[in-house]
Image (spheres, rainbow, N blue to C red):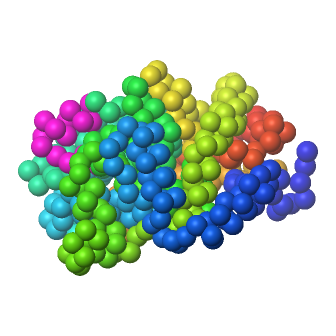
Amino acid sequence: MSTPSGSVTVPFTDQGQRFADDREAVLQLVSNALTEGPELDGPVVRRLEQRCAGMVGRRYARAVGSGTDALTLALRAARVGPADEVIVTNFSFVASAAPISVVGAIPVFVDIDPYSYLMDLDSVSSAITNRTRAIIAVGIFGRALPPKPFEDLASERGLTLIEDAAQALGAVRDGRLAGSLGQISAVSFDPLKVVGGITTGGMVLTDDPAIHERVRVLSSQGFNSCTGKFELLGCNSRMSTLNAAVLNYELDRYAQAFAQRRHAADTYLSGLAEHRYLRLPQCWAQHEIGNLHKFVIATEARGSLQRHLAKDGIETKIHYSTALSDLPIFCGSRSDAVHRSQIAARTVLSLPIHPQVSEQDLQYVVASINRWAP
Ligand SMILES: Cc1ncc(COP(=O)(O)O)c(C=O)c1O
């Protein structure tokens, strides 16, 4: 299969086709949402919250406007603020760390395990000082962190453990679901996530009633509907009935979407196993099921491979091209030895793994990569 130069044969995502097979069902959800009302924070949203809490084994869930808001609200609810240090991975989307700076605290970046790209526990441990208030434990690329070692470390050192499960909903590690790690978890329902809405969305999950209550008030302009008073300086971060209706629908389809992603991952893993110049992701470590949000390969000759694939009409992305400590926006941050995350930023390449990618597309991508050498 060849393509006229510049045209895309296999897109990285195919949002236009996302509801191609069930447009009628989704239009019915829209119609129901229009008649059900209220538009924000209604019973459909409550149902989504209950389902998410039940799914990951938390007592409370609060739907908010985005995963970024969920992390910011988690930090504020935990009373993290100016001069506090918060430890976070050096290799993630910017939103894992930006909320730390937004609440006036100091991000402390730590290095990753070079195989899983997950933040490294020993590096977290060595970065703790007497100013450390919290750890943000990030489940990158749809993988969950081992819960017990992180929870043990946080509780031994008296730190708040916040989980950034933005990419990891559905992932399991050591029998625990992502979204259940530490005191507070933040999830993203951005349309490109494994469970994605039709607009941005997020969820704060916790077992602590005081944290839940503070998030509820902060996310509604500081208004406490129980007392009828504005009690805190908050923000407006709520979810619409429409988005929650689509998310409830997507939760119902999770198993099917996961099976499609797993098939794509297995096809890449077996088709590319013999390639001499690639490092394939560890998708199936012991006691772990990732949600396959991303399929990330690595090569020192990334530019050459990305150009080769683009010529064949295969769209790829780089998650992430810069280690967070190298971003000028984090100029007041601290970081120790972070060279593994800098190597990752130089070498990683994400292949298309969305549920709409066809068998033919997968074979086409595999064949194209196997024709490439640096
Ligand atoms: C690791 C990580 N954290 C936080 C976020 C922020 O989520 P949102 O885009 O819903 O604000 C994202 C979004 O992609 C993410 O990948």
Name the side, left or right, on which 143 lies relative to 137. right
Instruction: Please report the residue visible at 39 percent of the width from the left and 31 percent of the height from the top.
Output: 176
Q: Residue at 14% across / 65% down in the picture?
A: 83
Is residue 158 highlighted in magenta? yes
Residue shown at the point (76%, 45%) measured from the top left: 357
Image-based side of 63 in relation to 214, left or right: right
Quarter of the image where the C terminus is located: top right
Q: Is residue 295 visible?
A: no
On the rendered image, what quadrant is the N terminus found in? top right
| Residue 239 position within the rendered picture, expressed as x and y whole percent measured from the top left | 48, 66
Region of the chain picked out in magenta, as a range: 149-162
Using the image as rendered, state which of residue 282 and residue 189 is in the foreground.
189
x and y percent of residue 152 in the render?
20, 32
Whether residue 234 is situated above or below residue 1 in the rendered picture:
below
Which residue is drawn at the image coordinates 69% and 66% (left, top)?
31
Q: Residue furthest front?
A: 35
Name the residue nearer the viewer: 277 or 119. Answer: 119
Residue nearest the observer in this picture, 351 or 55: 55
Left or right, residue 80 beside residue 325: left
